[in-house]
Image (cartoon, rainbow, N blue to C red):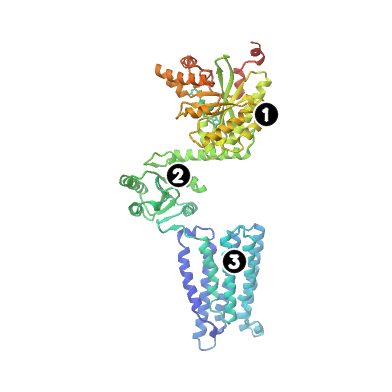
């Protein structure tokens, strides 16, 4: 080693920086990152390289007599550490790029072979050449410089080949950093210097840590983010450690940062006072999750009730609407890291400004809910028009004029292996909110069409069957085409199908709904306005839509039984619709009184338990009359 060309400043600085980096990356949240082992090793080997180099130098400088060759092993350790560092760098990048297995094996082998080769070379040139006189020819081969060339080539190759897997911003910056290292090494070498070799290897590590491990800690609010929350759940599940979660949702705040200073201070205050070693996480839409462990909080129940009190006082003071969900970790949820969704689910069933302590029942219900959503998603993605999980039930509708059952309403049911038969209140709104409803409807429509076809072949008189559609589906561009396609594929006349729609309160929907109704009416499809009398009816709007039949909701049938005035009111509506050429159908006719009253109130059609509960559509034929006989009347 040429003492003259070496200053320990680079290596001393590097040992200091690596020590600080170590304290930083061993913080809880970084530890949970999957790249953590690589970073830890990279930093450790950088430390070893710098420490070995500086020690080697110190011994050389301070020794007066003959230096034992063993000391030179420190120099070897220095350079071998750098070679290991190169290998780790490459392996980490390969992981980052999510290389396919076969490529990964090749890269790994290259790293191992390179490591072995350069280590041997280093050993020969820097150590054996000193010990064994015959090998003196190998002395001072610049191993680091030689190994740096294939190293940088491999790095750039990975960054380039897998650029689509690494965000552009990141991979260009990484490439620049590696090139910069090469330049600095070159400049240093051209001056016969080695002082900053180890320090140069720190640069890509700093860069990687900055990009890959942005701290999930928000210093402004003193909270960690959602990814940190998930990482914490994953880690505690691995360790089989029980967590307690107090989840607070503040309605009027998108972000905890929008809270007033005193409120923010209060939230922090109670959590740091009531809970020991708690961690506070911030989720979107004004949600805060405080997590604490039994290890530090001996009586978690008491902690929970003290938290509850604090939440209340917060509300009394600030009048900020909230919901709070309190729970312990549940293995079933931890395994899927499913708390965020679960908390949303529980919030749905929690009243405003109140607390909910999660029960077994909530978890069972949630598991069932997830299962149903998953199955509905599966039905929607397979889009098999014969899917056996979608069942068609129906209710025959009594025609007051012809005195026979000649129409019916199709009603959807879902049958799943784990839940059995499901009714619309258990799945329709889920299917709507997840965007699965259209697929389900098309399956139902297809099966309904096929039944109509069979009934016609059996010479049954069936004027039409009505099918319910949601407003969400109508918004789809291909709604009309899909409906037409399914009916046409079953080879039945279009007028055998009716569409039931409920009123949309949304003004912007209006033109869209009208255009789609008009388009499908041209084919001969009939339209029913469903659930008239629930919510606020906009009569003007209804009259601008070309419906054929107005379905009076069961609530109107019940209302009309209350007094003569109520009957008069319902009758007036019915009269008005009749005069405007709409037909009137009463839903929810349960007994003879209902029936008599509805007929007085100008009923054209009657539907309800009085005639039939919803039945499997295969039983509909029993209610229908033969076509030939009726035709002769
Ligand atoms: P809806 O369109 O108003 O359907 C009538 C509901 O009233 C049916 O409930 C039926 O069983 C019930 N009902 C019939 N007669 C009586 C009666 O005399 N008394 C009482 N109390 N109830 C009666 P269901 O089958 O549970 O359907 C509930 C709702 O689910 C339907 O209300 C409809 O809005 C929706 N739905 C059903 N099938 C579909 C579908 O294929 N697509 C869409 N989007 N919604 C559907
Ligand atoms: Ca309906
Ligand atoms: Ca209805």
In this rendering, is residue 259 above or below 3?
above
Q: Is 384 left or right of 605, judged from the image as shown?
A: right
Residue assigned mark 3:
175
Secondary element at tag 1? loop
**Residue at x 67% of width, y 19% of height:** 458
- What is the tally of numbered marks visible in this picture? 3
Q: Is 136 left or right of 599, judged from the image as shown?
A: right
Is residue 79 at least partly visible in the picture?
A: no
- Circle 2 packing at 10 Å, graded few (<14), some (14-19), many (20+), is some
450 or 477, which is in the foreground? 477
Residue 526: x and y, percent?
A: 59, 25
Residue assigned mark 2:
343
Q: Quadrant of the N terminus?
A: bottom right
- Circle 3 packing at 10 Å, graded few (<14), some (14-19), many (20+), is some
Residue 453: x and y, percent?
A: 67, 24
In this rendering, is residue 518 above or below 90?
above
Badge 2 or badge 1: first in the primary sequence: 2
């Amino acid at each position: 080693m040429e003492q003259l060309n070496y200053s320990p400043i680079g290596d001393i600085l590097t040992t200091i920086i690596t020590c600080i980096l170590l304290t930083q990356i061993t913080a809880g949240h970084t530890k949970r990152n999957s790249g953590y082992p690589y970073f830890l090793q990279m930093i450790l080997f950088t430390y070893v390289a710098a420490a070995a180099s500086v020690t080697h130098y110190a011994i050389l400088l301070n020794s007066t007599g003959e230096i034992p060759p063993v000391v030179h092993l420190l120099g070897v350790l220095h350079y071998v550490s750098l070679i290991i560092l190169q290998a780790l760098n490459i392996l980490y990048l390969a992981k980052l790029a999510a290389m396919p297995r076969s490529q990964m094996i090749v890269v790994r082998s290259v790293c191992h072979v390179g490591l072995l080769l350069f280590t041997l070379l280093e050993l020969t040139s820097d150590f054996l050449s000193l010990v064994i006189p015959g090998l003196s020819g190998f002395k001072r081969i610049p191993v680091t410089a030689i190994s740096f060339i294939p190293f940088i080539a491999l790095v750039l190759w990975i960054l380039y080949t897998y650029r689509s897997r690494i965000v552009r911003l990141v991979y260009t910056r990484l490439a620049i950093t590696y090139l910069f290292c090469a330049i600095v090494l070159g400049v240093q070498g051209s001056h016969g210097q080695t002082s900053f070799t180890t320090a140069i290897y720190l640069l890509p590590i700093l860069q990687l840590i900055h990009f890959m491990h942005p701290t999930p800690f928000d210093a402004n609010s003193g909270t960690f983010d959602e990814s940190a929350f998930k990482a914490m759940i994953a880690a505690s599940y691995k360790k089989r450690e029980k967590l307690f979660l107090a989840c607070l949702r503040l309605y009027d705040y998108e972000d905890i940062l929008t809270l007033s200073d005193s409120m923010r201070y209060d939230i922090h205050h109670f959590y740091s006072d009531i809970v020991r070693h708690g961690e506070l996480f911030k989720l979107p839409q004004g949600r805060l999750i405080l997590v604490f462990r039994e290890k530090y909080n001996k009586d978690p129940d008491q902690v929970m009730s003290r938290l509850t009190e604090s939440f209340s006082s917060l509300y009394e003071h600030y009048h900020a609407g909230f919901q709070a969900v309190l729970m312990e970790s549940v293995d079933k949820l931890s395994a899927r890291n499913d708390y965020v969704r679960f908390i949303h689910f529980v919030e749905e069933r929690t009243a405003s400004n109140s607390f909910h302590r999660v029960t077994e029942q909530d978890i069972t219900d949630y598991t069932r809910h997830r299962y149903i959503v998953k199955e509905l998603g599966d039905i929607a993605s397979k889009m098999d028009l014969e899917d056996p999980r979608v069942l068609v039930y129906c209710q025959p509708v009594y025609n007051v004029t012809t005195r026979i059952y000649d129409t019916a309403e199709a009603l959807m049911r879902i049958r799943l292996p784990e839940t059995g038969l499901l009714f619309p209140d258990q799945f329709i709104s889920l299917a709507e909110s997840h965007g699965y409803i259209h697929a389900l409807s098309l399956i139902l429509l297809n099966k309904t069409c096929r039944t109509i076809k069979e009934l016609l072949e059996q010479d049954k008189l069936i004027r039409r069957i009505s099918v319910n559609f949601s407003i969400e589906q109508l918004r789809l561009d291909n709604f009309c085409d899909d409906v037409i396609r399914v009916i046409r594929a079953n080879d039945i006349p279009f007028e055998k199908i009716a569409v039931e729609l409920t009123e949309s309160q949304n003004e912007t929907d209006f033109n869209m709904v009208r255009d789609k109704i008009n388009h499908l009416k041209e084919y001969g499809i009939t339209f029913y306005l469903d659930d008239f009398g629930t919510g606020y009816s906009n009569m003007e709007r209804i009259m601008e839509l070309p419906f054929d039949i107005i379905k009076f909701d069961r609530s109107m049938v019940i209302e009309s039984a209350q007094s003569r005035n109520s009957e008069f009111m319902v009758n007036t509506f019915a009269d008005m619709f009749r005069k405007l050429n709409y037909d009137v159908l009463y839903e929810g006719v349960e007994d003879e009184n209902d029936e008599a009253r509805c007929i007085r109130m100008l009923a054209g059609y009657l539907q309800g338990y009085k005639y039939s509960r919803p039945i499997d559509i295969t039983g509909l034929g029993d209610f229908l009359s033969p076509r030939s006989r009726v035709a002769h009347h």
